[in-house]
Amino acid sequence: MQLDDLLQRYFATTDLSRVAPDTFAAGIEHCRVDLGLEEDRGKRFALWSFLHMFGSAPDLDVAFENEEDREAARNFMDLLAASEGEGEA
């Protein structure tokens, strides 16, 4: 799953500045539905990560049955948090 493909699928554009608030909300809801239906672990993780970046991901215990997947998600969150702090000095 490529980021541009996900943006196009859920928001009909790769330019988020052009997405109206109602279109954004609908795209997020569509992605949450797809996450709930997806059975492939890798694709579920990609969809959850996408939602996480928009502050819309479900809790780990809801999103992932497997503890390994929950741990990978925690690591992803830690990496994102660390990268956001790198610009601070």
Image: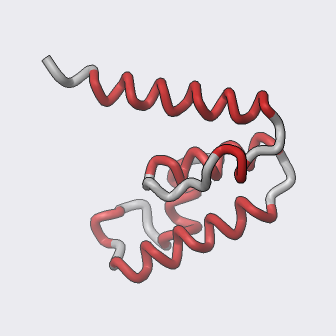
Q: Measuring 48% from the left and 70% from the top, which residue is drawn there?
A: 11
Question: Which residue sits furthest right?
Answer: 39
Counting from the top left corner in percent of width and height, residue 41 is at: 81, 43
Counting from the top left corner in percent of width and height, residue 74 is at: 59, 30
Counting from the top left corner in percent of width and height, residue 45 is at: 69, 43
> Looking at the rendering, which quadrant does residue 38 occupy?
bottom right
Q: Measuring 46% from the left and 48% from the top, which residue is drawn there?
A: 53
Question: Which residue sits furthest bottom?
Answer: 22
Choose between 33 and 4: the one closer to the eye. Answer: 33
Q: Measuring 62% from the left and 65% from the top, which residue is drawn there?
A: 31
87 versus 43 height, above or below: above
Colour option used: secondary structure
35 sits to left or right of 17: right
> Looking at the rendering, which quadrant does residue 65 occupy?
top right
89 versus 9 height, above or below: above
73 sits to left or right of 55: right
67 versus 44 height, above or below: above
